[in-house]
Image (spheres, coloured by chain):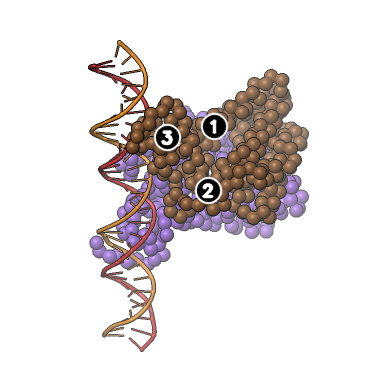
Chain colours: A brown, B purple, C red, D orange
Amino acid sequence: MPRIVKHPEIRREELLDHAQALFLKHGYDKASLNDVIAAAGISKGAFYHYFASKEALLEALAERFARQALAGVQKIVYDPELDPLARLNALLAQSRQAKVETAAEAWALFETMFRPENLVLFHRINLAASKSFSPILVEIIRQGVDDGTFRTFDPEGVADIVMQFGLATHDVIAKAFAGGSDADMDIAIEALERRVRLYEIALDRILGLPDDSIRIGEPGYVRAVMTARRTGPAASATPPPKIRKGS
Amino acid sequence: MPRIVKHPEIRREELLDHAQALFLKHGYDKASLNDVIAAAGISKGAFYHYFASKEALLEALAERFARQALAGVQKIVYDPELDPLARLNALLAQSRQAKVETAAEAWALFETMFRPENLVLFHRINLAASKSFSPILVEIIRQGVDDGTFRTFDPEGVADIVMQFGLATHDVIAKAFAGGSDADMDIAIEALERRVRLYEIALDRILGLPDDSIRIGEPGYVRAVMTARRTGPAASATPPPKIRKGS
DNA sequence: TACTATACCGACCGACGGTCTATAACTCAA
DNA sequence: TTGAGTTATAGACCGTCGGTCGGTATAGTA
């Protein structure tokens, strides 16, 4: 085989790209290292030059995801114009916005992320993302407590609850995918809107705010996310040749 | 090898027992099928006579866990004496009680359950348990809404939140274990007490109840759970010969 | 040009989950 | 009591996996 040398950073990013595609398509467990190196067009030896193990590859991938997610919210947090409530709402809105865009641009990614075989992958990404987001959330809530906007004795706890709600939303989405028919999807969308509304009110009350202070998304935003798949690039319903044995 | 025949149900339970021990000790991924059948003293063929795959074994194990967990709360739910709030509190108290007892009787199990390598195992068990518990919770909340005790427009959503809180408590416990020193443990215990208190108030407010209506556990119960390990059978700090390669 | 550090190759390894054929042990009707 | 049929067990075997290793081509430096 011809020997191809590339700039290490490029090689590394390429590896992450191919790994991301394969992990999302088949799941972390079912996508084999050989698949990854075949896709990337390199040898085993080259791979282990860049990553200590398959696990390390997963870790690096999760970090990259988290870094990208974090980049989007940096400005909001340090905007001195905003009061804590506005800041919290802006953060939640940003997260919503990211979801809408993801859904529109990369529906396949969005969909696969919630498939059960991606539990491990998803968990890693989420762990990394939480680690990044938690301090930001805590800081916002603490500011709000200090200036009397929020009333709670446990900012860290509330921050965790906020992130839990975000995660739980994903679970509801996953269930929506589990169905499949358009009718199922419609029901799922309504359940989701309802759930988002519940989380808004729950957060209001946990933070000691008047109802309707927290706005995760405008009414109808869930539908906007979910129906984006019609316009976005669709994932093949029957991904043709499975890489390994039965699903 | 001598051929040993046992009653199928006994054999199956034995397999589950050994699998449970090994999965908890080493994690689902790292405990191999060969380990399981070696522990159970049977052949590959015998194993595959009882379970279609390693995955199916995991599923069966999760179901058994869920069944056992469910058995403990059956009486409460159908006790006609209790009003919805008392019923909900009884359910939460029961879950607390179960944790205290587990901690005292089988600390090792309790501890291993939260190790990161047991994510998959834990998730399966929890999925099965949730499936069982969710309808019960929903039923209780719906009753409360009907008779005016609770005020919420989304009983299913609130039930999910209650279960999320239960899960999140486990996460906090897991973090407590991640530390290790007694000082760390003490800090973790205080964080947990605080967190439980937050969840109580959060639930009060989400359900439109006066503060202090929901009682997950008596004050100090977290400490009771966590310090139970002193009296319970301790897990070896350095599990001697790892089954597979590096942790 | 000679030397070193880095990037890369691919044969090889033990262990894994899973399959298959053979057969010992039970069941029960005749 | 026997023997046909079914169920439970054994263990050799298979393809693939993640990971290792000895070696080679390339880039940088002097």
Tag shown at residue A116 = 2
Disc 3 designates what residue?
A56
Are the numbered discs 3 and 2 placed on the same chain, yes or no? yes
Do the residues marked 3 and 1 share a common chain? yes
The answer to which quarter of the image holds residue B75 is: bottom right
User: Residue at position x 54%, y 36% from top?
Assistant: A126
Callout 3 crowding tier (Cα within 10 Å): few <14, some 14–19, many ≥20:
few
Q: Residue at x 50, y 31 (%)?
A: A63
Q: Nearer the viewer, residue A215 or A71?
A: A71
In the rendered image of this protein, does residue B117 appear above or below residue D11? Answer: above
User: Which kind of residue does numbered mark 2 sit on?
Assistant: Pro
* Separation (CA) of disc 3 from disc 2: 21 Å
Could you tell me which quadrant the N terminus of chain A lies in? top left
Tell which circle, 2 or 1, labels the residue nearer the N-terminal end. 1
Earlier along the polypeptide chain: callout 3 or callout 1?
3
Residue D20, compared with residue B142, is above or below; it is above
